[in-house]
Image: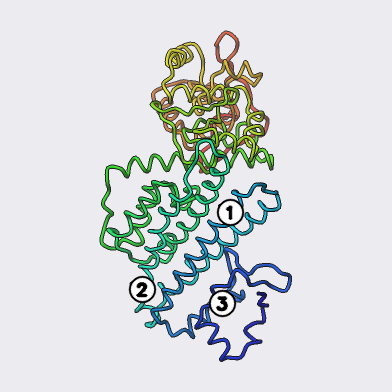
Amino acid sequence: MLLQSNSLHLCRHGDFCELMARQNWLRDCDLRRDMDGEAYLQLEYQEDDELMVLLQHFLEESRAQKQLVKDLYQIWQQTVLSTLLASSALWKKESVQSSDQRFMKDQLKLARYKINFIMHHTIGSMLSSSDAKWKQHVPDLLQLVYQTLQLLPRLAESCPHHKTDMRQTIIHFEGKEFLAAVACESWDTLYDFSIPIDPEKFIPILRRCAMLDILDKDWNMLGGWEDVLKGLEARCCLTGPVLRLPCDSILHDQTTILRNARNSMQCKFFSVRFMRYTEDQAPQRWKYFAKCSAPACGHVETPQSPHSFRCQSCWYFHYCSEACMEYCDNIMGLHHKFCKDTPPAKAALCKRETEQYLGWAGAAAADASTLEHDVLCHACGVSERLLSESGSSKMKSCGKCQSVFYCSKQCASWDWRIGGHQQSCSISEENGTTTTAETDETTNHTNVVGAKNSNGATAATSGVAGATAAVQGAAEPMN
């Protein structure tokens, strides 16, 4: 079924009204193509786009009967269920070709766009409309949104994670990411349009989705669970603060781990594919995160239950199951690319963070020895010994107080702007600490650094000529 961009002009007014009444235009919106065969569905629209014109006519011409709300839910449900079934059927085939995977990827994207158009644009417009014919259906529309959220946990349970069956795990990952996108369209519609909700009704089902890691794919919409609660409180909960349960703080910690770990993996991907970062930029690429390294997996290891599979070369990759390891290593090919991209000093830092978190024997003693006999970067914590072993440059001290050291300009910049050293450095100066800048009136502290020599003494060295640093109105005392 191909409906061209001039469809409104080609159909008679009676035909158009019949089309609107039957909701066929909305049911089949994913089939609409322009003259070049490109789908009209997208995430952002202009007012004169085909679907937005159709939607505007629909909102104006529709009789807004209660049956319409039921039809919208059926369209939503059919789209979600058919997409999940298609994904499952693909990976249950005896042989899956790359062309099949590309087709399924396009279908998942188109389904997400359709859900976005139904929830955010169509239902969002109805909920926020000032027209009395739509206002009378606000309770029914809110019930529709609630029903969409209520169905998602049951659907997630229908495609569970499998420890050894890699195909079942792929079905789980694809289904989970799709359901997270679907859930986000539901609650984000309420948030974006500031629609008042009943917290006693909505928050428990949102909490269940968060526990299953299907509320937000990467937890980037508002942040972790507590950030979601605060956002909804501010815009949708007119009766006051949402009641917090003891589990909410744990859930926030869990979702924050998921958010940070996925952000780290995305930075690794961009770095390898687009060469966007130097070794010291995006430092989260090298940090240890307790989440299973398969991107869509939400399993978090604990000292009581560490993951069974771990790379002891980069120390970044660890997996909760054999299936996750096979998926990440062989299907996505992430481990091989990222492991060889890891500098030895960063791998050693990740190893130490792993040992500290898991409480492995000997880790504490090794750390105590390192702290006593070695110099650590004040920002990322890498030791000068590890830098030396990897052939990297020596630590450089803060050119102002000379009491802390950094492995790179990026770490010095972060610690000055965000990490709090600007305040502590100023305090040490007020207490009478003599700085290099004070002993040389012609040299500004922004281009003087101290480099530790082999005897551990500090020598002042001039920075790169002409280098300046002015971030948020304050210079960073290191080059």
Q: Residue at x 31, y 61 (%)?
A: 237
The correct choice, above or below, for 330 with respect to 141 in the image is above
Question: Which circle, 3 or 1, is nearer the viewer?
Answer: 1
Residue type (three-letter) at the residue carrying disc 3 = Trp
Nearest to N terminus: mark 1 or mark 2: 1
- In space, the residues marked 2 and 3 are separated at their CA atoms by 22 Å
Residue at image point 58% right, 43% down: 167
> Residue 56 at x, y = what percent?
52, 79
**Viewed as shown, does residue 162 lie left or right of 443?**
left
Q: Is residue 235 above or below residue 465?
A: below
Q: Nearer the viewer, residue 256 or 375?
A: 256
Say which residue label 3 marks. Answer: 25
Q: Secondary structure at mark 3?
A: helix
Residue appearing at x 36%, y 68% in the figure: 142
Give whichever of discs 3 and 1 has the lower sequence position: 3
- Residue underneath mark 2: 138
How many other residues sit within 10 Å of disc 3, few (<14), some (14-19) or many (≥20)?
some
Label 2 crowd (10 A; few <14 / some 14-19 / many >=20): some
Residue 338 placed where, x, y %? 63, 33
Rendered image: mark on residue 89 = 1
Looking at the image, tell me whether mark 2 or mark 3 is earlier in sequence order: 3
Q: Residue furthest front?
A: 94
Q: Amino acid at mark 2?
A: Val
Is residue 227 left or right of 1 when viewed as pictured? left
The label nearer to you, 2 versus 3, is 3
Expressed as whole percent of the image width and height from the top left, the position of residue 114 reads 55, 65
Label 1 element class:
helix
Instruction: Quadrant for residue 420, please give it.
Output: top left
User: Looking at the picture, which amino acid does disc 1 mark?
Assistant: Ala
